[in-house]
Amino acid sequence: MNKAFFIDRDGTINKYIPYINNIDDFELIEGVSEAIRLINQSKWLVIVVTNQPQVAKGLLLENDVNKMHDKMTSLLSKDNAKIDGIYYCPHSPPNKFKNGNKDYQINCSCRKPKSGLYMQAQKDFNIDFSSSIFIGDTTRDIAVTKDIGGKSILLKCGLGGKDNKFPITPDHYCKNLLDAAKTILKK
């Protein structure tokens, strides 16, 4: 079985902008390419798992989210860094947004911290959760480890864990994704 770095997107890979909806505003955080390149040089997979409620809010279409992911992979590729898989949830809970796209305002199994996206990645890449790392800038990004196992890293960049939405104590705190990659890979 494979092991993976499950990495959040907004505030972890790219600069945090609430409900980012303009592709021109999408910028990588300094050191992210180096971090992903280090992971690529190891035997670990790089899997991005992200909630994108901008679709439910009516700010983006799913095609727009895919274009943003294309920009992300293109920017990383220029730095010889590669993401193995990208999984996202376009949903929000019912009635969270007064306006927006009601078709996406549903109870789903894919919105983090639920395990749906992780389970799909596990199936697609034969991943062992217990040997994997879950990284993000919010408690939502790492809370899934309570249900599926693995080690968690809460980053001090982005929202820096200040959301306090889920009662979880991470296995590690790190400054940013590069610090997290070096901590796990002992670089």
Image (spheres, helix red, strand yellow):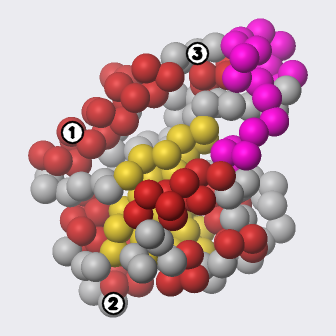
Q: Is residue 105 magenta?
A: yes
Residue 142 in view of the camera: yes
Q: Residue furthest top?
A: 99
Name the residue tied to disc 3: 59
Q: Which of 100 and 17 lies nearest the eye of the viewer?
A: 100
Q: Of the two numbered discs 2 and 3 on the same chain, state the one appearing first in sequence.
A: 3
Amino acid on which the number 3 mark rests in the picture? Leu
Q: Of the two numbered discs 2 and 1 on the same chain, state the one appearing first in sequence.
A: 1
Say which residue appears at 53% left-offset and 41% top-offset.
88
Amino acid on which the number 2 mark rests in the picture? Lys
Residue 50 in the image: x percent, y percent? 55, 46
Name the residue tied to disc 2: 186
Disc assigned to residue 129? none
Residue range of the region highlighted in magenta in the rendering: 95-112
Secondary element type, mark 2: loop
Q: Are marks 3 and 1 in contact (CB under 8 Å)?
A: no
State how far apart marks 2 and 3 are (Cα).
40 Å
Q: Are marks 2 and 1 in contact (CB under 8 Å)?
A: no
Q: Residues within 10 Å of mark 3 (few under 14, many from 20)?
A: some
Q: Residue furthest right?
A: 95
Q: Is residue 123 magenta?
A: no
Q: Of the two numbered discs 3 and 1 on the same chain, state the one appearing first in sequence.
A: 3
Residue 175 in the image: x percent, y percent? 47, 69
Residue 89 in the image: x percent, y percent? 60, 38
Q: Quadrant of the N terminus?
A: bottom left
Q: Is residue 186 above or below residue 133?
A: below
State how far apart marks 3 and 1 are (Cα).
23 Å
Secondary element type, mark 3: loop
Name the residue tied to disc 1: 74
Q: Are marks 2 and 3 in contact (CB under 8 Å)?
A: no
